[in-house]
Structure formats: structure tokens, C-alpha cells
Image (cartoon, grey):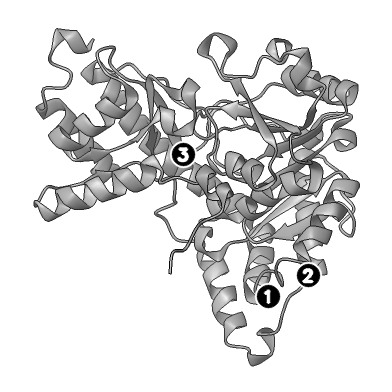
Amino acid sequence: MEIKLSEKMNHFQTSIFNELSNYKKEKLKEGKEIIDLSVGSPDLPPPSFVIDELTKQVSDPSQYGYALTGIDKLHEEISNYYDKNYQVELQADTDVLTVMGSQDGLVHLPMVLTNPGDVVLLPDPGYTAYEAGISLADAKPHMMPLKEENQFLPDLEAIPEEVYVKAKLMILNFPGNPIPTLATKEFFQDVIRFAKKYHIVVLHDFAYSELYYEEKPISFLSIEGSKEVGIEFNSFSKSFNMAGCRIGYVVGNSTVIKALNRLKSNLDYGVFIPIQKAAIHALKNTSSFSAELRNTYKQRRNILVNGLNELGWKVDAPKASMFVWAKVPKAYTSTEFAYRLIDETGIVVTPGNAFGAAGEGYVRIALVQKEEILQKAIIKLRESSIFSSTKDN
């Protein structure tokens, strides 16, 4: 019989990530050495104390029931973490919600806050899951371009009146993916004023909060008035290399937290309890591990950025996150350049336009390989013809 898909599936096409993955597989079959710097997934393991706790808990037969919600102790530790790191006071029973990875909550939140046709303001370029959630809610995205001349921060004054009067949600992400920009206190203050004036809920995606180098990122919730208008998502994936565990959390406005919890109670049965208990140990022991993790990524960043600049590929050193946002040579589109890199060097990066139209002219490079692999990537680029031609400069 003929099976017809829903019209909603038109919003979920095969992405550039899949295309790059397939092209990479073709090159591997041809015997080409591949250095994959495209996917933002940690290549490092969780800290040993997290693995030890997880091992202990999964060996306990009594831990295999439904969790249903986040356990009280985890919510208390999340509250303590925010108090210690950002001087943000949270009520563990009303201001905190555990989710099955921050992406799970991010994708579902538009269904909580918008009706079909309502507008969601989101960064362009931005994390691709944002648009997926908007499509599921039948809401309409309005892109806020992140431009170099604005320090890659959205220009709130550029949002047309006919858009912001229909907007119900604004999504922000600092440090960002794909652009590793940090927000300023002044920008967040402007956002809060804007949100209050037009009754817009603010979602701040803070997944890279622990991956910073010269400057500590600002929590949106640390700004006065933020809890009146918004929430902040965070994750154990990047901060503690627990990506496969699928555990994250959302904190902030209790009304939004309660509503998302209500939706989630109809969709899943909570995060596996041993994973929640391992997450508690991660938060209790964050300081030393986070410092070591930051140092590892900083060394990788320095090797890659210094090497690229020595080649003539002028890129800025990110202050945070696990990404480098790099302009492509003028002769190429983002996609053309990404494929040429694979063909000539075996290096895989992500075209900037995969994250939105405003990402055209850039590529995202992930710091997800060991230092010696990054050094090898620099050598491959030096040996290629990519930066030797004057038309590329």
C-alpha cells in the first residue's frame, strides 16, 4: 500500500550533516584519511568519579524502575551549583526541572508557549534543534541575524513591530553554537526590558557554560529581573562529557517550569535513576574536573587557531565553547569550501549555512580531536593548495 507522510514532515528534510557524513563514508571507502571536526560531540570520557558512581548504581537491581521526575537530591545539587557559580537563588522544588538532555526540553518548549502561527525569535545562525521545536508547535520562526558588526549579538531594534507583537518566545544561546560568542550584561538587560514590554518568554541555552577560557560566561538568570521573563537550559553533555547519558535541566521561571513539566509528564518517564545519581556526583565535584577540561580545550584551541593563522587563514580565538567560527576564502560558498577541504585534505567541517542563512560565508570547526590530530590537520592544510592561490585570499 502507499504510505503518505504528514505535511509536517516537509519541515524535516535530510540535513547537511547527513550529506557530509555520507560523503565522508565515501572517502573512507576510497582509502582517504579523514579528520572529522564537524560534529560537536565530546571525544573525551566523563570524569572517573562519574563513571564509578554510574557503575555502582547500575549494579543495584532496585534502580530500574521509572524515575518519573528528577530526584530531589539532584534538584538540590543543581540549585547549589547555581548559587555557588552564579549567585542565583533557586527553589529546588519549583524552579528546577530535569530533562532527557537539554535538547529534549528545547524542542518541546515551543509547544508549551505558542499556538499555531505565533512567532518565535531565534538566532541565525543557530542550533538546528531550535527550528525543529518551532515546526512541531506549528509556530513561525523569525530569524535574528548574528552579524560580526554587532559582535554576533541579535539587534533587538531591528525586529519589526508586526513581528514582536506576535512573538511569544525568544531563544538565545551564549556561549553560542555555532558562533562561540559571549553575551554581555548590558545585552541581557536589554533583552529583559524587551521581553517585559512585549510579554515574550526568554529561553537561554547555556549548554557551554563550563567551557570557557579567558572570560567566564554570564548566566542569564544572574541578571536582575530575568526570572520574571525567562528560563535557562543547561546540560551535562558538554560540561562533564556525559553526552550519551542524555541528561540536562532547565531552571528559572516557576510558571514555565511547571508547564513544561506538565507536558513532559505526558511524554516520558524521566531520566534513568543511576544517571541522575551520577549527575549529582558530577555537580558535587565540578571544580577540579571543569578546570582540567577547560585547559584541554584551550590547548586544542590554541594549536588550531595559531596554526590556521600561520597558514594565512585568519580566524579569531573563541573565548568559550568547543568551536571555531571561521570565514571561508572569498572565492567559495560555505558548502563549496567544506567539500573542497574534504577532497584535498580529508578534513571535515560544517558549512555555516547549515545553521541558517546568516551563516553563509563561514564554517564551524569543532575542537573534538586530540592535539596531535589537530596538528596533523594543520600539516594537511599546509601541504594542500587551498591557501596557496591568491584567489583564495
- Residue nearer the viewer, 152 or 20: 20
Q: Give the residue at x 46% y 41%.
A: 295
Q: Which residue lies furthest to the front in this view?
A: 1
Q: Give the residue at x 15% y 48%.
A: 27
Decide if residue 218 is on the left or right side of residue 322.
right
Residue 83 is at least partly visible in this image: no
The residue at which mark 2 appears reads as 71
Residue 261 is tagged as none
Real-space CA distance between mark 3 and mark 2, rounded to the nearest whole angstrom: 30 Å
Q: Are marks 3 and 1 in contact (CB under 8 Å)?
A: no
**Residue 328: quarter of image:** top left
Q: Give the residue at x 21% y 13%.
A: 392
Q: What residue type is labelled 1?
A: Ile
Residue 273 is tagged as 1
- How many residues crowd mark 2 within 10 Å: few (<14), some (14–19), many (20+)? some
The secondary element bearing badge 2 is classed as loop
Real-space CA distance between mark 2 and mark 1, rounded to the nearest whole angstrom: 8 Å
**Residue 324: quarter of image:** top left
Q: Name the spot of residue 68 as percent of width and height, x first.
A: 76, 73
The secondary element bearing badge 3 is classed as loop
Residue 322 is tagged as 3
The secondary element bearing badge 1 is classed as helix
Decide if residue 260 is on the left or right side of residue 146.
right
Real-space CA distance between mark 3 and mark 1, rounded to the nearest whole angstrom: 29 Å
